[in-house]
Image (cartoon, rainbow, N blue to C red):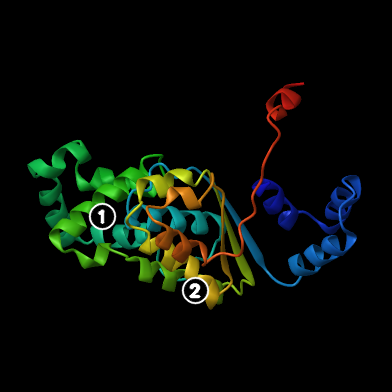
Amino acid sequence: AALTVKSLLEADDDEIRAYFEDYGLSNDLCQKLITDKNGGKIITIHRIGSAFIRSDQDLILAVQDSIKSALQNYGEESLKEAALKWLEDDINREYFNALIHKDEYAWAFGGEEVTTIIEKLKDESNEVQTIMRNILKVAEDNGITALRLDILGLASWIKDVIAKNNISAILFVWDEFTEFFQNNPNSLTGFQTLAEISLSHPFYFMIVSHESRSLFVNADTAKKILDRFVPSVKIELPENMAFRLMA
């Protein structure tokens, strides 16, 4: 269902009409979708999985990287680009190199030099997420504010991206989001801050998870978070659906 929404927003008008006709869906809804889709620049983002999100910094990196990959003009510097700029200064590089060779960080960086780390960040390797998480840990421990972006900073960055790219809406579809709530039951402020962006700017989260309310520690927290969203859409499938799909 999440991918269908994303695909419909990216499809051309004829494909949308054909889809609605094939499935006997509302013509009024079809026209409303086409009108909204053609009313401005809509960016759709799809991300799967949240098991690795265990802090606001993980959430910040994931959201920012996803938005960056969907755009060519990012607005302000990204967190990774800010890190690269800071590390490429000779004095900063020597200082950071000394830090990551301390016992508490040596294992995370595998004894590598900063020059190697910079190359990996530039190459967009699969290790970027882990490397940035380790860099931010060092920055946090040692008060290197130039390498940190808090959740409010990310919210400002998103608003800046929307303004500079003349975007009418960003729809962020995040599938398999259940583990985020399981991993962060008592630290949902960052997520709530991002959800609140939609009050003033067209940035919309479409979260796909198992029954959300049962994932929160208490009812008050559930209400506080879920009230940031329009009423949830509950999808239930017949017990024999798996067999029907296989058939």
Residue 36 position within the rendered picture, expressed as x and y whole percent measured from the top left: 75, 68
Residue at 37%, 52% (x, y): give it: 217
- Please give the label number shown on residue 136: 1
How many numbered discs, if any?
2
Residue 92 visible in the displayed image? yes
What's under tag 1, amino acid-wise?
Answer: Leu
- Please give the label number shown on residue 86: none
What's under tag 2, amino acid-wise?
Answer: Lys
Q: Secondary structure at mark 1?
A: helix
Does residue 245 lie above or below 57 as drawn?
above
Residue position marked by numbered label 2 in the rendering: 159
Does residue 158 lie above or below 237 as drawn?
below
Question: Label 2: how many residues lie within 10 Å, few (<14), some (14-19) or many (20+)?
Answer: some
Q: Quadrant of residue 65?
A: bottom left
Does residue 40 lie above or below 190 as drawn?
below
Instruction: State which quarter of the image contains the C terminus.
Output: top right
Q: Secondary structure at mark 2?
A: helix
Q: Quadrant of residue 221?
A: bottom left
- Seen from the viewer's position, the closer of residues 88 and 232 is 232
Query: Quick check: 61 left or right of 38?
Result: left
Measured in 3D between alpha carbons, the distance from the residue under mark 1 to the one under mark 2, in whole angstroms, is 23 Å
Mark 1 or 2, nearer chain start: 1
